[in-house]
Amino acid sequence: MVNSRLLVTAAAALALSACSLNMGFAPEAPKSGAFVVGDEPYAVRAGAAVMAQGGNAADAAATMYFALAVTYPVAAGLGGGGLCLVHDPKRGRNEEFVFLARSTAAGGAYAVPGNVRGIALMQTSYGVLPWQRIVAPAEGLASTGFPISQALAQRLASAENVIRLDAGLAAEFMDEGGHAKAAGAVVANADLAGTLSEIRTQGADAVYTGAPAQKILAYATAQGGAIASGELGAYATSRVLPHVLRLGDEYVFLPSDETGAGVFAGALFDVLARALQTATGSSNTEAAVVVAAKQALGRFTVADLPNDLGATGFAATDAGGQAVACAVTMNGPFGSGHSAQGTGVTLARAPSSGSAGLAAAFLTPVLATDGAGNLLLAGAGAGGPVGTASIADALARLSRGEVVTRRDKPDVAGATVTYDTVNAILCQSAACTALPDANSSGLGVGAP
Protein backbone atom coordinates (compact mmCIF):
# COMPACT_ATOMS: atom_id res chain seq x y z
CA MET A 1 0.00 0.00 0.00
CA VAL A 2 1.26 3.50 -0.83
CA ASN A 3 1.58 5.61 2.29
CA SER A 4 0.36 9.19 2.64
CA ARG A 5 3.84 10.67 2.41
CA LEU A 6 4.36 9.06 -0.98
CA LEU A 7 0.99 10.29 -2.18
CA VAL A 8 1.83 13.84 -1.20
CA THR A 9 5.21 13.54 -2.89
CA ALA A 10 3.58 12.12 -6.01
CA ALA A 11 1.06 14.93 -6.15
CA ALA A 12 3.83 17.50 -5.90
CA ALA A 13 5.83 15.75 -8.59
CA LEU A 14 2.87 15.61 -10.90
CA ALA A 15 2.15 19.28 -10.35
CA LEU A 16 5.74 20.14 -11.21
CA SER A 17 5.74 18.05 -14.38
CA ALA A 18 2.12 17.83 -15.47
CA CYS A 19 3.03 18.14 -19.10
CA SER A 20 5.24 15.07 -18.81
CA LEU A 21 2.13 12.98 -18.17
CA ASN A 22 -0.05 14.51 -20.85
CA MET A 23 -0.18 12.36 -23.96
CA GLY A 24 -1.26 15.45 -25.87
CA PHE A 25 1.86 17.37 -24.79
CA ALA A 26 2.61 20.09 -27.34
CA PRO A 27 5.46 22.34 -26.19
CA GLU A 28 5.84 25.96 -27.15
CA ALA A 29 8.43 26.87 -29.74
CA PRO A 30 11.72 25.65 -28.27
CA LYS A 31 14.50 27.89 -27.15
CA SER A 32 17.28 27.87 -29.72
CA GLY A 33 18.93 24.47 -29.44
CA ALA A 34 16.84 23.20 -26.50
CA PHE A 35 15.78 19.63 -27.30
CA VAL A 36 15.35 16.22 -25.70
CA VAL A 37 15.12 12.81 -27.37
CA GLY A 38 14.80 9.20 -26.26
CA ASP A 39 13.09 5.84 -26.68
CA GLU A 40 10.19 6.29 -24.24
CA PRO A 41 7.78 9.27 -24.58
CA TYR A 42 6.88 9.81 -20.90
CA ALA A 43 10.53 10.05 -19.95
CA VAL A 44 11.27 12.46 -22.80
CA ARG A 45 8.38 14.68 -21.72
CA ALA A 46 9.67 14.64 -18.16
CA GLY A 47 13.03 15.91 -19.42
CA ALA A 48 11.37 18.64 -21.48
CA ALA A 49 9.27 19.70 -18.50
CA VAL A 50 12.31 20.08 -16.24
CA MET A 51 14.08 22.15 -18.86
CA ALA A 52 10.99 24.36 -19.13
CA GLN A 53 11.28 24.90 -15.37
CA GLY A 54 14.77 26.38 -15.74
CA GLY A 55 16.89 23.26 -16.00
CA ASN A 56 19.73 22.76 -18.46
CA ALA A 57 20.72 19.77 -20.59
CA ALA A 58 22.33 17.93 -17.66
CA ASP A 59 19.18 18.35 -15.58
CA ALA A 60 17.00 17.14 -18.47
CA ALA A 61 19.16 14.09 -19.16
CA ALA A 62 19.22 13.10 -15.48
CA THR A 63 15.45 13.54 -15.20
CA MET A 64 14.94 11.42 -18.30
CA TYR A 65 17.09 8.67 -16.82
CA PHE A 66 15.13 8.42 -13.57
CA ALA A 67 11.83 8.55 -15.47
CA LEU A 68 13.11 5.78 -17.77
CA ALA A 69 13.88 3.67 -14.70
CA VAL A 70 10.12 3.73 -14.07
CA THR A 71 8.60 3.82 -17.56
CA TYR A 72 11.26 1.78 -19.42
CA PRO A 73 12.88 -0.51 -16.79
CA VAL A 74 13.56 -3.20 -19.36
CA ALA A 75 16.62 -1.14 -20.35
CA ALA A 76 17.17 1.64 -17.79
CA GLY A 77 16.57 0.24 -14.31
CA LEU A 78 18.18 1.54 -11.13
CA GLY A 79 20.23 -1.67 -11.04
CA GLY A 80 22.01 -1.06 -14.35
CA GLY A 81 24.94 0.99 -15.61
CA GLY A 82 26.04 3.17 -18.49
CA LEU A 83 27.96 6.10 -19.94
CA CYS A 84 27.34 9.83 -20.41
CA LEU A 85 29.22 12.45 -22.41
CA VAL A 86 28.89 16.16 -21.58
CA HIS A 87 29.77 19.15 -23.77
CA ASP A 88 29.88 22.38 -21.78
CA PRO A 89 30.98 25.37 -23.90
CA LYS A 90 30.81 27.80 -20.97
CA ARG A 91 33.55 25.84 -19.19
CA GLY A 92 35.27 24.82 -22.42
CA ARG A 93 35.00 21.22 -21.31
CA ASN A 94 34.07 17.84 -22.77
CA GLU A 95 33.88 15.02 -20.26
CA GLU A 96 32.84 11.39 -20.01
CA PHE A 97 31.20 9.74 -16.99
CA VAL A 98 31.73 5.96 -16.84
CA PHE A 99 29.36 4.10 -14.52
CA LEU A 100 28.94 0.65 -16.03
CA ALA A 101 27.51 -2.14 -13.89
CA ARG A 102 30.33 -4.35 -12.64
CA SER A 103 30.80 -8.01 -11.86
CA THR A 104 31.35 -8.89 -8.23
CA ALA A 105 34.57 -10.38 -6.91
CA ALA A 106 32.71 -13.61 -6.14
CA GLY A 107 31.38 -13.83 -9.69
CA GLY A 108 27.68 -13.89 -8.86
CA ALA A 109 24.84 -13.50 -11.34
CA TYR A 110 24.00 -9.94 -10.23
CA ALA A 111 25.99 -6.84 -11.12
CA VAL A 112 27.00 -3.98 -8.84
CA PRO A 113 24.83 -1.11 -10.15
CA GLY A 114 26.32 2.15 -11.41
CA ASN A 115 23.45 4.19 -12.88
CA VAL A 116 22.33 6.10 -9.80
CA ARG A 117 25.78 7.27 -8.73
CA GLY A 118 26.84 8.01 -12.29
CA ILE A 119 23.80 10.06 -13.21
CA ALA A 120 23.95 11.86 -9.85
CA LEU A 121 27.60 12.85 -10.32
CA MET A 122 26.90 14.08 -13.85
CA GLN A 123 23.91 16.17 -12.72
CA THR A 124 25.53 17.66 -9.63
CA SER A 125 28.62 18.53 -11.70
CA TYR A 126 26.80 20.22 -14.59
CA GLY A 127 23.15 20.75 -13.64
CA VAL A 128 21.57 23.85 -12.09
CA LEU A 129 18.41 22.52 -10.43
CA PRO A 130 18.16 20.99 -6.94
CA TRP A 131 18.53 17.22 -6.84
CA GLN A 132 15.00 16.76 -5.52
CA ARG A 133 13.56 18.33 -8.68
CA ILE A 134 15.40 15.75 -10.78
CA VAL A 135 14.08 12.64 -9.03
CA ALA A 136 10.56 13.82 -8.13
CA PRO A 137 8.94 13.26 -11.57
CA ALA A 138 10.04 9.60 -11.62
CA GLU A 139 8.83 9.11 -8.06
CA GLY A 140 5.44 10.50 -9.01
CA LEU A 141 5.17 8.20 -12.01
CA ALA A 142 6.02 5.14 -9.93
CA SER A 143 3.69 6.08 -7.09
CA THR A 144 0.53 7.16 -8.89
CA GLY A 145 1.04 5.08 -12.02
CA PHE A 146 1.36 5.68 -15.75
CA PRO A 147 -0.12 4.13 -18.90
CA ILE A 148 2.25 1.71 -20.61
CA SER A 149 3.55 3.38 -23.77
CA GLN A 150 3.77 1.64 -27.11
CA ALA A 151 7.56 1.73 -26.73
CA LEU A 152 7.44 -0.21 -23.46
CA ALA A 153 4.65 -2.54 -24.62
CA GLN A 154 6.80 -3.79 -27.49
CA ARG A 155 9.66 -4.67 -25.16
CA LEU A 156 7.34 -6.27 -22.60
CA ALA A 157 5.80 -8.57 -25.20
CA SER A 158 9.20 -9.91 -26.21
CA ALA A 159 10.36 -10.31 -22.59
CA GLU A 160 7.37 -12.29 -21.23
CA ASN A 161 9.52 -15.26 -20.30
CA VAL A 162 11.72 -13.03 -18.16
CA ILE A 163 8.88 -11.12 -16.53
CA ARG A 164 6.83 -14.11 -15.41
CA LEU A 165 9.72 -15.58 -13.43
CA ASP A 166 9.96 -12.64 -11.02
CA ALA A 167 7.10 -11.87 -8.62
CA GLY A 168 7.71 -8.12 -8.64
CA LEU A 169 7.93 -7.80 -12.41
CA ALA A 170 4.96 -10.09 -12.97
CA ALA A 171 2.78 -8.17 -10.52
CA GLU A 172 3.43 -4.94 -12.38
CA PHE A 173 3.58 -6.00 -16.00
CA MET A 174 1.60 -9.27 -16.43
CA ASP A 175 -2.16 -9.47 -16.89
CA GLU A 176 -4.45 -12.09 -15.35
CA GLY A 177 -3.97 -14.33 -18.37
CA GLY A 178 -0.22 -14.49 -17.82
CA HIS A 179 0.73 -12.24 -20.71
CA ALA A 180 2.45 -8.89 -20.84
CA LYS A 181 0.08 -5.97 -20.37
CA ALA A 182 -0.75 -3.99 -23.48
CA ALA A 183 -0.12 -0.34 -24.28
CA GLY A 184 -2.47 1.89 -22.31
CA ALA A 185 -2.70 -0.33 -19.22
CA VAL A 186 -1.94 1.72 -16.12
CA VAL A 187 0.80 0.34 -13.87
CA ALA A 188 2.48 1.53 -10.68
CA ASN A 189 5.27 0.33 -8.41
CA ALA A 190 5.01 1.40 -4.78
CA ASP A 191 8.30 -0.26 -3.81
CA LEU A 192 10.15 1.57 -6.57
CA ALA A 193 8.45 4.81 -5.53
CA GLY A 194 9.74 4.23 -2.01
CA THR A 195 13.29 3.72 -3.26
CA LEU A 196 13.08 6.85 -5.39
CA SER A 197 11.82 8.73 -2.35
CA GLU A 198 14.94 7.64 -0.49
CA ILE A 199 17.10 8.73 -3.42
CA ARG A 200 15.33 12.09 -3.61
CA THR A 201 15.73 12.85 0.09
CA GLN A 202 18.98 11.04 0.94
CA GLY A 203 20.82 11.35 -2.37
CA ALA A 204 22.32 8.71 -4.63
CA ASP A 205 24.03 6.98 -1.71
CA ALA A 206 20.65 5.57 -0.66
CA VAL A 207 21.13 2.78 -3.19
CA TYR A 208 24.68 2.10 -2.04
CA THR A 209 24.72 2.55 1.73
CA GLY A 210 21.15 3.40 2.81
CA ALA A 211 18.04 1.37 3.56
CA PRO A 212 17.49 0.28 -0.08
CA ALA A 213 21.11 -0.89 -0.19
CA GLN A 214 20.58 -3.14 2.80
CA LYS A 215 17.55 -4.71 1.12
CA ILE A 216 19.50 -5.24 -2.10
CA LEU A 217 22.34 -6.91 -0.22
CA ALA A 218 19.97 -9.12 1.77
CA TYR A 219 18.19 -10.21 -1.40
CA ALA A 220 21.42 -10.90 -3.29
CA THR A 221 22.74 -12.96 -0.37
CA ALA A 222 19.52 -14.97 -0.10
CA GLN A 223 19.57 -15.68 -3.83
CA GLY A 224 23.26 -16.53 -4.00
CA GLY A 225 24.00 -13.38 -5.97
CA ALA A 226 27.07 -12.57 -3.89
CA ILE A 227 27.16 -8.76 -3.84
CA ALA A 228 29.34 -7.79 -0.88
CA SER A 229 28.45 -4.70 1.14
CA GLY A 230 31.91 -3.29 0.53
CA GLU A 231 31.50 -3.64 -3.24
CA LEU A 232 28.18 -1.82 -3.24
CA GLY A 233 29.25 1.00 -0.96
CA ALA A 234 32.59 1.53 -2.66
CA TYR A 235 31.23 1.84 -6.19
CA ALA A 236 32.75 4.93 -7.84
CA THR A 237 32.05 6.65 -11.15
CA SER A 238 35.04 7.40 -13.38
CA ARG A 239 35.44 10.86 -14.90
CA VAL A 240 37.68 10.76 -17.97
CA LEU A 241 38.40 12.63 -21.16
CA PRO A 242 36.46 11.21 -24.11
CA HIS A 243 38.20 9.91 -27.20
CA VAL A 244 38.41 12.67 -29.84
CA LEU A 245 38.87 12.24 -33.57
CA ARG A 246 38.37 14.23 -36.76
CA LEU A 247 35.75 13.35 -39.34
CA GLY A 248 36.15 15.89 -42.11
CA ASP A 249 35.84 19.25 -40.35
CA GLU A 250 34.00 17.74 -37.38
CA TYR A 251 35.43 16.98 -33.96
CA VAL A 252 33.79 13.78 -32.75
CA PHE A 253 33.78 12.86 -29.04
CA LEU A 254 33.35 9.16 -28.27
CA PRO A 255 33.62 6.93 -25.18
CA SER A 256 37.24 6.47 -24.15
CA ASP A 257 39.01 3.23 -24.96
CA GLU A 258 38.99 2.16 -21.31
CA THR A 259 35.63 0.49 -22.05
CA GLY A 260 34.49 -1.99 -24.66
CA ALA A 261 32.13 0.70 -25.96
CA GLY A 262 35.08 2.96 -26.63
CA VAL A 263 37.03 0.19 -28.34
CA PHE A 264 34.17 -0.64 -30.70
CA ALA A 265 33.13 2.93 -31.47
CA GLY A 266 36.72 4.10 -31.82
CA ALA A 267 37.52 1.30 -34.25
CA LEU A 268 34.41 2.00 -36.32
CA PHE A 269 35.02 5.74 -36.54
CA ASP A 270 38.74 5.36 -37.26
CA VAL A 271 38.03 3.05 -40.20
CA LEU A 272 35.25 5.35 -41.38
CA ALA A 273 37.44 8.46 -41.27
CA ARG A 274 40.04 6.77 -43.47
CA ALA A 275 37.41 5.40 -45.85
CA LEU A 276 35.79 8.80 -46.35
CA GLN A 277 39.12 10.32 -47.30
CA THR A 278 39.22 8.06 -50.36
CA ALA A 279 35.51 7.63 -51.14
CA THR A 280 33.94 10.02 -53.63
CA GLY A 281 30.30 11.00 -53.86
CA SER A 282 27.57 10.81 -51.23
CA SER A 283 26.43 7.43 -52.58
CA ASN A 284 29.49 5.85 -50.95
CA THR A 285 28.70 7.09 -47.44
CA GLU A 286 26.56 4.18 -46.26
CA ALA A 287 28.87 1.65 -47.90
CA ALA A 288 31.81 3.16 -46.01
CA VAL A 289 29.85 2.97 -42.73
CA VAL A 290 28.92 -0.68 -43.33
CA VAL A 291 32.54 -1.61 -44.05
CA ALA A 292 33.69 0.25 -40.94
CA ALA A 293 31.09 -1.50 -38.77
CA LYS A 294 32.07 -4.94 -40.05
CA GLN A 295 35.76 -4.28 -39.44
CA ALA A 296 35.04 -3.01 -35.92
CA LEU A 297 32.95 -6.10 -35.20
CA GLY A 298 35.90 -8.20 -36.28
CA ARG A 299 37.63 -7.21 -33.05
CA PHE A 300 34.86 -8.92 -31.07
CA THR A 301 34.36 -12.68 -31.36
CA VAL A 302 30.58 -12.52 -31.61
CA ALA A 303 28.91 -15.58 -33.12
CA ASP A 304 25.31 -14.52 -32.57
CA LEU A 305 23.86 -11.34 -31.09
CA PRO A 306 20.89 -11.61 -28.69
CA ASN A 307 17.61 -10.12 -29.86
CA ASP A 308 17.48 -7.69 -26.93
CA LEU A 309 20.52 -6.47 -25.00
CA GLY A 310 18.39 -4.38 -22.63
CA ALA A 311 19.82 -0.97 -23.53
CA THR A 312 18.63 2.52 -24.43
CA GLY A 313 20.10 5.92 -25.28
CA PHE A 314 18.92 9.51 -24.86
CA ALA A 315 20.21 13.05 -25.28
CA ALA A 316 19.48 16.67 -24.38
CA THR A 317 20.71 20.07 -25.51
CA ASP A 318 19.92 23.52 -24.16
CA ALA A 319 19.88 27.15 -25.27
CA GLY A 320 23.29 27.77 -23.71
CA GLY A 321 24.96 25.17 -25.92
CA GLN A 322 25.37 22.49 -23.26
CA ALA A 323 24.76 18.97 -24.55
CA VAL A 324 24.51 15.59 -22.85
CA ALA A 325 24.35 12.16 -24.49
CA CYS A 326 23.85 9.01 -22.40
CA ALA A 327 23.42 5.29 -22.99
CA VAL A 328 22.50 2.80 -20.27
CA THR A 329 21.92 -0.93 -20.07
CA MET A 330 20.68 -3.73 -17.85
CA ASN A 331 22.89 -6.23 -19.74
CA GLY A 332 19.80 -7.96 -21.09
CA PRO A 333 16.05 -7.27 -20.95
CA PHE A 334 15.29 -6.53 -17.27
CA GLY A 335 18.87 -7.54 -16.54
CA SER A 336 19.02 -10.61 -14.32
CA GLY A 337 15.21 -10.71 -14.21
CA HIS A 338 15.35 -10.54 -10.41
CA SER A 339 13.95 -7.64 -8.35
CA ALA A 340 15.30 -7.03 -4.86
CA GLN A 341 12.31 -7.50 -2.55
CA GLY A 342 10.92 -4.31 -1.08
CA THR A 343 12.90 -1.97 -3.40
CA GLY A 344 11.43 -2.29 -6.89
CA VAL A 345 15.05 -2.44 -8.11
CA THR A 346 15.71 -5.04 -10.79
CA LEU A 347 19.37 -6.05 -10.72
CA ALA A 348 21.43 -6.04 -13.91
CA ARG A 349 23.08 -9.21 -15.11
CA ALA A 350 26.76 -9.42 -14.28
CA PRO A 351 28.72 -8.48 -17.43
CA SER A 352 30.76 -11.67 -17.03
CA SER A 353 27.58 -13.74 -17.47
CA GLY A 354 27.20 -15.11 -21.00
CA SER A 355 26.42 -12.44 -23.60
CA ALA A 356 25.69 -9.78 -20.96
CA GLY A 357 29.00 -8.03 -21.52
CA LEU A 358 28.12 -7.31 -25.14
CA ALA A 359 25.50 -4.78 -24.07
CA ALA A 360 28.10 -2.37 -22.70
CA ALA A 361 30.25 -2.75 -25.82
CA PHE A 362 27.51 -1.21 -27.94
CA LEU A 363 26.69 1.80 -25.77
CA THR A 364 27.69 4.76 -27.92
CA PRO A 365 26.92 8.23 -26.62
CA VAL A 366 28.43 10.67 -29.13
CA LEU A 367 28.95 14.43 -29.31
CA ALA A 368 30.25 16.37 -32.30
CA THR A 369 31.23 20.00 -32.82
CA ASP A 370 32.63 22.12 -35.60
CA GLY A 371 36.02 23.82 -35.41
CA ALA A 372 34.55 26.74 -33.49
CA GLY A 373 33.07 24.47 -30.83
CA ASN A 374 29.48 24.78 -32.05
CA LEU A 375 27.41 21.66 -31.48
CA LEU A 376 26.60 19.55 -34.52
CA LEU A 377 25.23 16.40 -32.92
CA ALA A 378 24.37 14.94 -29.54
CA GLY A 379 23.06 11.40 -29.64
CA ALA A 380 23.43 7.81 -28.61
CA GLY A 381 23.35 4.40 -30.18
CA ALA A 382 22.56 1.49 -27.87
CA GLY A 383 21.54 -2.15 -27.92
CA GLY A 384 23.60 -3.30 -30.89
CA PRO A 385 26.27 -2.37 -33.44
CA VAL A 386 23.79 -0.86 -35.89
CA GLY A 387 22.95 1.85 -33.37
CA THR A 388 26.61 2.87 -33.35
CA ALA A 389 26.76 2.63 -37.13
CA SER A 390 23.69 4.87 -37.45
CA ILE A 391 25.35 7.63 -35.43
CA ALA A 392 28.46 7.26 -37.59
CA ASP A 393 26.35 7.44 -40.74
CA ALA A 394 24.68 10.68 -39.61
CA LEU A 395 28.02 12.29 -38.82
CA ALA A 396 29.55 11.13 -42.09
CA ARG A 397 26.68 12.73 -43.99
CA LEU A 398 26.93 15.92 -41.98
CA SER A 399 30.65 16.08 -42.76
CA ARG A 400 29.76 15.99 -46.44
CA GLY A 401 27.28 18.83 -46.13
CA GLU A 402 24.19 16.65 -46.53
CA VAL A 403 20.92 17.49 -44.82
CA VAL A 404 20.23 14.60 -42.45
CA THR A 405 16.63 13.61 -41.72
CA ARG A 406 14.94 10.45 -40.45
CA ARG A 407 16.13 7.52 -42.49
CA ASP A 408 16.66 3.77 -42.34
CA LYS A 409 19.64 2.38 -40.43
CA PRO A 410 22.68 1.11 -42.34
CA ASP A 411 22.29 -2.52 -43.39
CA VAL A 412 25.13 -4.26 -41.57
CA ALA A 413 24.64 -7.90 -42.51
CA GLY A 414 24.78 -10.30 -39.56
CA ALA A 415 24.63 -7.49 -36.98
CA THR A 416 20.91 -6.77 -36.85
CA VAL A 417 19.38 -6.68 -33.37
CA THR A 418 15.65 -6.07 -32.97
CA TYR A 419 16.01 -3.60 -30.13
CA ASP A 420 19.08 -1.66 -31.13
CA THR A 421 18.31 2.04 -31.14
CA VAL A 422 19.65 5.44 -32.14
CA ASN A 423 18.40 8.82 -30.92
CA ALA A 424 20.04 12.10 -31.84
CA ILE A 425 19.77 15.88 -31.86
CA LEU A 426 21.29 17.32 -35.04
CA CYS A 427 22.21 20.94 -35.67
CA GLN A 428 22.49 22.05 -39.29
CA SER A 429 22.56 25.56 -40.75
CA ALA A 430 22.10 27.10 -37.27
CA ALA A 431 18.90 25.06 -36.67
CA CYS A 432 18.59 21.99 -34.47
CA THR A 433 16.08 19.15 -34.50
CA ALA A 434 15.51 16.02 -32.43
CA LEU A 435 15.39 12.74 -34.36
CA PRO A 436 14.16 9.69 -32.43
CA ASP A 437 14.82 6.23 -33.82
CA ALA A 438 12.75 5.93 -36.99
CA ASN A 439 11.99 2.27 -36.29
CA SER A 440 10.79 2.66 -32.69
CA SER A 441 8.09 4.50 -30.75
CA GLY A 442 10.29 7.10 -29.08
CA LEU A 443 10.01 10.86 -29.05
CA GLY A 444 12.03 13.97 -29.75
CA VAL A 445 10.69 17.39 -28.70
CA GLY A 446 11.83 20.96 -28.38
CA ALA A 447 11.94 22.19 -24.79
CA PRO A 448 10.01 25.44 -24.22
Image (cartoon, rainbow, N blue to C red):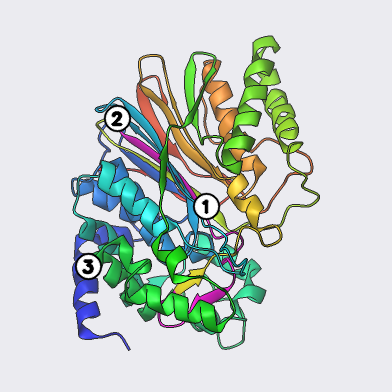
Residue denoted by label 1? 312
Task: From the top left corner, tell me how far across and down residue 323 is, in percent.
Answer: 35, 35
Residue denoted by label 3? 201
- Residue type marked 2: Gly
The one nearer the camera, 387 or 211, is 211
Is 295 placed above or below 306 here?
above
Q: Is mark 2 on a helix, strand or loop?
A: loop
**The stretch drawn in magenta includes residue 226:** no
Residue denoted by label 2? 321
- The quarter of the rendered structure image containing the N terminus is bottom left
On the question of residue 429 being in view, the answer is yes
Query: What residue span does the magenta drawing correspond to?
Result: 321-344
Is 432 placed above or below 193 here?
above
Left or right, 319 with respect to 212, comes to: left
Report the residue at 43% width, 66% height from top: 230
Is 161 placed above or below 104 here?
below
The one nearer the camera, 397 or 310, is 310
Mark 2 → mark 1, Cα distance in angstroms: 24 Å
